[in-house]
């Protein structure tokens, strides 16, 4: 089921995240949390270094994924990236008054074509990258690579800073956690779909992203072992309500970004929760959105 961009009377582009309903219940079932094994290969590339076709091939293979894109197609993608970056900058200026230079830099540094991969079918689709009309792309198991305008919006909304520690609920393609990792100190990401979480955990090392930590488990519970909690918590699926466990792990002066609403229904709203220096939680509505549902404990009837 493809989601479709909608516009409010204020012409706000909705944040889109995932595009297929999940069909295999077992893969979404919350398993006991475990940290995915870290890959043992050396990094194929580090942000800021030259990104060429050979480096792209090496990074894909080091992450255990196949490559179908040819060198000519790779070059065409690089030329399209400049147009996509201009679109992102214009959109952020429209929404926030100005574009955060750290968000723009992180987008420029990350090779988005590296994340265009269907993990369920073991099929790359990098040739679709930097599409003129941003859209989400299926990556298997009911998950998706979100559209790049939505990711840019949520990133700037979270106000990431270099010293921040971030929790992401819903690893998905790994692009959002990689994007944040180019700005903040550490990113912890939880994915409930075991095969997806295990495979995506292998993509960070080849890009030199050593500050991303992954786990398969139920994001409702966050990552309580992280001492001191999180400056930012970003939930990338629609929750029926905000998890009290996540609020506990939010630091004073922290920001929790979460879409709240009923599964597969209109009326979902992106909320921003903040915690003041005294520990009191405040919330505000941001914009209407449409996400596939957060699963696991959140789906149980609240008593």
Image (cartoon, rainbow, N blue to C red):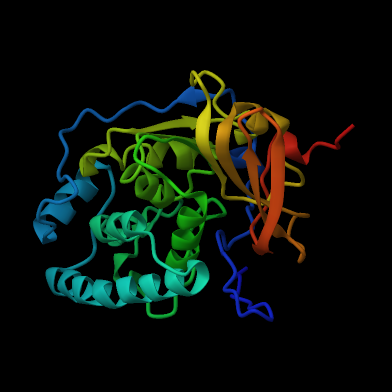
Query: Looking at the picture, how far across and down is residue 35, in whole percent?
Result: 44, 24
Query: Looking at the picture, how far across and down is residue 251, in whole percent?
Result: 56, 30
**Residue beneath the point at 65% across and 44% down:** 273
Please name whichever residue, 60 or 234, is drawn nearer the observer in this view of the structure. 234
**Residue beneath the point at 31% across and 43% down:** 203
Q: Quadrant of the C terminus?
A: top right
The image quarter in which residue 2 lies: bottom right
Query: Looking at the picture, how far across and down is residue 30, in whole percent?
Result: 63, 32
Answer above or below: position of 209 versus 258: above
Q: Quadrant of the N terminus?
A: bottom right
Q: Evaluate whether residue 192 shows in this view.
A: no
The image quarter in which residue 84 lies: bottom left
Query: Which residue is at the far right?
Result: 303
Left or right, 168 with respect to 31, comes to left
Query: Which residue is at the far front?
Result: 277
Please name whichever residue, 79 or 71, is drawn nearer the observer in this view of the structure. 79
**Residue beneath the point at 47% across and 70% down:** 97
**Residue beneath the point at 63% across and 47% down:** 24
Please name whichever residue, 297 or 254, is drawn nearer the observer in this view of the structure. 254
Query: Looking at the picture, how far across and down is residue 48, in whole percent?
Result: 15, 51
Answer above or below: position of 238 versus 268: above
């Amino acid at each position: 089921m493809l989601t479709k961009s909608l516009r409010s009377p204020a012409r706000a582009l909705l944040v889109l995240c995932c595009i297929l309903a999940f069909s295999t219940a077992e893969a979404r079932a919350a398993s006991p949390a475990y940290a995915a094994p870290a890959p043992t290969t050396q990094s194929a590339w580090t942000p800021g270094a030259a990104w060429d076709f050979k480096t792209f091939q090496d990074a894909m293979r080091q992450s255990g994924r196949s490559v179908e894109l040819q060198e000519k197609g790779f070059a065409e993608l690089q030329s399209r990236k400049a147009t996509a970056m201009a679109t992102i900058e214009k959109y952020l200026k429209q929404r926030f008054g100005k574009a955060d230079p750290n968000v723009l830099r992180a987008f420029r540094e990350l090779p988005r074509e590296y994340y265009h991969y269907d993990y369920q079918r073991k099929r790359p689709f990098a040739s679709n990258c930097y599409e003129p009309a941003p859209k989400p792309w299926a990556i298997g198991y009911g998950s998706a690579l979100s559209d790049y305008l939505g990711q840019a919006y949520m990133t700037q909304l979270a106000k990431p800073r270099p010293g921040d520690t971030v929790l992401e609920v819903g690893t998905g393609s790994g692009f959002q956690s990689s994007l944040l990792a180019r700005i903040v100190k550490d990113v912890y990401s939880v994915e409930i779909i075991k095969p997806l979480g295990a495979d995506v955990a292998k993509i960070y090392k080849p890009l030199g992203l050593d500050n991303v930590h992954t786990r398969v488990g139920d994001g409702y519970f966050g990552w309580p072992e992280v001492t001191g909690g999180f400056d930012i918590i970003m939930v990338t699926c629609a929750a029926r309500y905000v998890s009290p466990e996540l609020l506990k792990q939010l630091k004073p002066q922290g920001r929790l970004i979460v879409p709240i609403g009923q599964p597969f229904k209109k009326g979902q709203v992106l909320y921003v929760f903040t915690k003041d220096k005294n520990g009191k939680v405040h919330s505000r509505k941001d914009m209407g959105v449409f996400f596939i549902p957060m699963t696991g404990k959140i789906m149980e009837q609240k008593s």
